[in-house]
Image: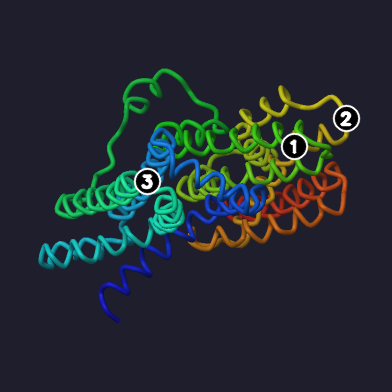
Amino acid sequence: MSSLRVLIRSLVRVFYETNLGFFLIVLYFAFGLMGGNEHVAFATSIATSLPLTLLTLFLWSIYYLKILGFLYKIINQNSYTFIRQLSLHSLNKQFIWLFSIVFQMGMPAWAYAFFIANFNFTYHTYGLFILIIGFLIVINTLIVVIVIKLLKKPTREASLGFWHTHISKKISLPYSLWYIRHLFVHEPLLAFFTKASSLFLLSFSFYLFETDMYDWRLLAIGALFAFIANSMLIYNNYEFNAKNYWVFNLPRTRTSIISNSLITTSLLFVPEVIIILVRMPSIIALSDKTGLLLIQICLACFLLSTLLIRPVPKEDYGKRVFYVLIGMIFLIMYSISLITINLILLGISVYILTRYYNYILNKRPT
């Protein structure tokens, strides 16, 4: 197998599988909420307006930052140390291979750029076409240059941060907040973009609800797609618990462990709960309001419990989220009560957690 094919399977494929939730959200907006006429009108506006073109380039730059962040993280993972062997090849080979990799990761932006190009040529806005294509070439090249330099640097060593060296000596943080602190200290960009995307999707769903005659199912599906934005936080929570397995050797009861797990999961969705409370239409029935408030938390508990008994690599986790999402949409579209769905999800979660932690605690040395 050629080196380029190995890189494609190790980087491009993993990138799309890891970010499956993000691309599902994009597809939801592109084909679920927008029709052909809206796509044409939107692309025409971008192709004939410099401010809208610049706004599009700004959004693409955020997407490319996501690509750079992914590559930076991969390079510093022990399981991907073979990627650093790229630095042993000539500079030309490194550039060509990495340019191809970044280009394939950025294919959504390139595809939409050529869609806009049709309207650039129709309305003779050739300058904006050159600006769009030039921007993509430059940012693609810039990321390649950054990655080539990163490959030459040694693997980043973990070090104690400000919290461990100062604050943790004076404050004993409850275990239910350990993952929350870890998230904001070690994964601040993930936390920010996750919550920004999730809250935007929720707000958009409530806005859409007010524009026409919809029922609670629109808001429920909007909450599900907002959950997709949060899905990687659940997987990271699972990984965090796996790395801190030593905690189970402490004298803690099963009830304490399960309650801490539920509290941690609930705290992840406090921003979403606040948005739902503030924007909740008065015409929604009380039972549906309660269901909307709890649906993401119950779904998160369910996915976390399935990871405990059926672990999957991060690359395959997106597939599980996708299948669960399809099942949830099916139930909602058939008007199954959200309270019923929540009770089923929560019941399954508590049952699995109880059985799992019973097994763990029975193995604990006495």
The amino acid type of the residue labelled 1 equals Leu
Instruction: Identify the residue position indicated by label 1 in the image.
Output: 294
Mark 1 and mark 2 residues within 8 Å of each other at the beta carbon: no
Residue at 29% in and 64% down: 100
Q: Can residue 366 be seen from the camera position used here?
A: no
Residue furthest to the left in view is 90
> Of the residues tagged 3 and 2, which is closer to the observer?
3
Residue at 63% in and 40% down: 261
The amino acid type of the residue labelled 3 equals Thr
Give the distance between the C-alpha atoms of the residues marked 1 and 2, in whole angstroms: 13 Å
Mark 2 crowd level (few <14, some 14–19, many ≥20, 10 Å Cα) = few
**Percent position (x, y) of residue 317?**
55, 59
Residue at 53% in and 63% down: 316
Give the distance between the C-alpha atoms of the residues marked 3 and 1, in whole angstroms: 49 Å
Q: Can residue 137 be seen from the camera position used here?
A: yes
Mark 1 crowd level (few <14, some 14–19, many ≥20, 10 Å Cα) = many
- Please identify the quarter of the rendering in which residue 327 is found: bottom right
Instruction: Look at the numbered disc 1 and give the secondary structure of its residue.
Output: helix
**Could you tell which of marks 3 and 1 lies nearer the N-terminus?**
3
Give the distance between the C-alpha atoms of the residues marked 3 and 2, in whole angstroms: 53 Å
Query: 6 left or right of 205?
Result: left
Q: How is the image coloured?
A: rainbow
**Could you tell which of marks 3 and 2 lies nearer the N-terminus?**
3
**Percent position (x, y) of residue 79?**
33, 61
Mark 3 and mark 1 residues within 8 Å of each other at the beta carbon: no
Residue at 75% in and 53% down: 328
Instruction: Identify the residue position indicated by label 2 in the image.
Output: 286
Query: 154 left or right of 77?
Result: left
**Percent position (x, y) of residue 329?**
75, 53
Instruction: Identify the residue position indicated by label 3 in the image.
Output: 125
